[in-house]
Image (cartoon, rainbow, N blue to C red):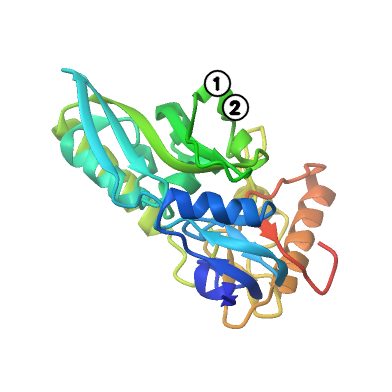
Amino acid sequence: MTKNLAELTSIKIGGAAAFFYEPATVVELTALLAAHPDAVLLGGGTNIVFGAMPRRAVISMKKINAALNEWREIAADEIRVTVGAGKPLAEVVRQAVAGGWRGVENLIGIPGTVGGAVAMNAGAQGRAIGDAVEKVVGVDYGGTPVEKIFTPAELGFAYRTSRLQTTPIAVVAVELRLRRTAVAELAPRAAAWLAARAACRIKLPNCGSVFRNPAGEKSAGELLESAGMKGETRGALRVSPTHANFFENLGGATGDDFCDLLDRARDAVRRRTGIALTPEVKIIGEFCRKN
């Protein structure tokens, strides 16, 4: 079936996908991967910008093991949490905080699915989800419905990335390792982080952080602001006046608008500081211009 991809992304930008699927089981998923070995896997659509997709398939992972939610205490102070790739990350974080289990509380307020968060090694407050991963269950693109287990060492977690970004493996389940902490200690800390995130939340459609933070004292947002990018526009897309590392869709922005504004922002920082910013958002598909 065809699909307007703008409907599936948080920034509301995207062309049409000629082949769109939303499998409900791992068996269905592996069959689709065998038929479409270059398919793009889509979680919550929060860190991706699509152009047109006339040839590559897009497979939504939201239904894959979405109901899987097992919490297994292995010691008085340790629990293993097994959840499906399609599980909303926010639900897992809320349940952990409410139960007094630390390890993912820093992810509070981050949108998307668990599978997507693991693939990009989502993080905040100096920690990432990879720090809490015990193992990942996945299937390869070869079409064999055999689930394989991957350890954190095999996944190569690093700042906002993992080998899942470049390896033909589809995450179907994740096991997290959490530690016991008093709710009275954990809940206020998580609430403070959530309040801080809410205070600078961008209300217009956006894809989250556009660039990764580079090494050094200044964040990507600070570098973009010092380069004069706050409020800059391209078409219907604007660098947020609230936070320069966010692009806002003012209504009707296109993938070309995004690529052009991204290039302009990156060039402005490079000219001012010599620092080459690396995109955190994934840009996939065909555009009128070369991206």
Residue at numbered disc 1:
153
Can residue 128 be seen here? The reply is no
Residue 162: which numbered mark, if any? Answer: none
Q: Amino acid at mark 1?
A: Ala
Left or right side of 85 for 71 = left
Res 101 → quadrant = top left
Rendered position, 130 above or below 285? above
User: Closer to the camera, 53 or 1?
Assistant: 1
| Residue found at x 84% / y 70% | 289
Against 19, is 104 above or below?
Answer: above
| Labels 1 & 2 near each other (Cβ < 8 A) | yes
In the rendering, at what x and y percent does residue 44 appear? 46, 58
| Position of residue 238 in the picture relative to residue 138 (left or right) | right
Of helix, strand and loop, which one carries label 2?
loop
Residue 210, picture quadrant: bottom right
Q: Position of residue 173 (x, y in %)?
A: 41, 40
> Mark 2 belongs to which amino acid?
Gly
CA gap, disc 1 to disc 2? 6 Å
Q: Is residue 198 visible?
A: yes
Q: Residues within 10 Å of mark 2 (few under 14, many from 20)?
A: some
Secondary structure under badge 1? helix
Counting from the top left corner in percent of width and height, residue 8 is at: 51, 69
Residue at the disc numbered 2: 156
Q: Position of residue 61 (x, y in %)?
A: 47, 55
**In this orientation, which residue lies closer to the viewer: 105 or 156?**
156
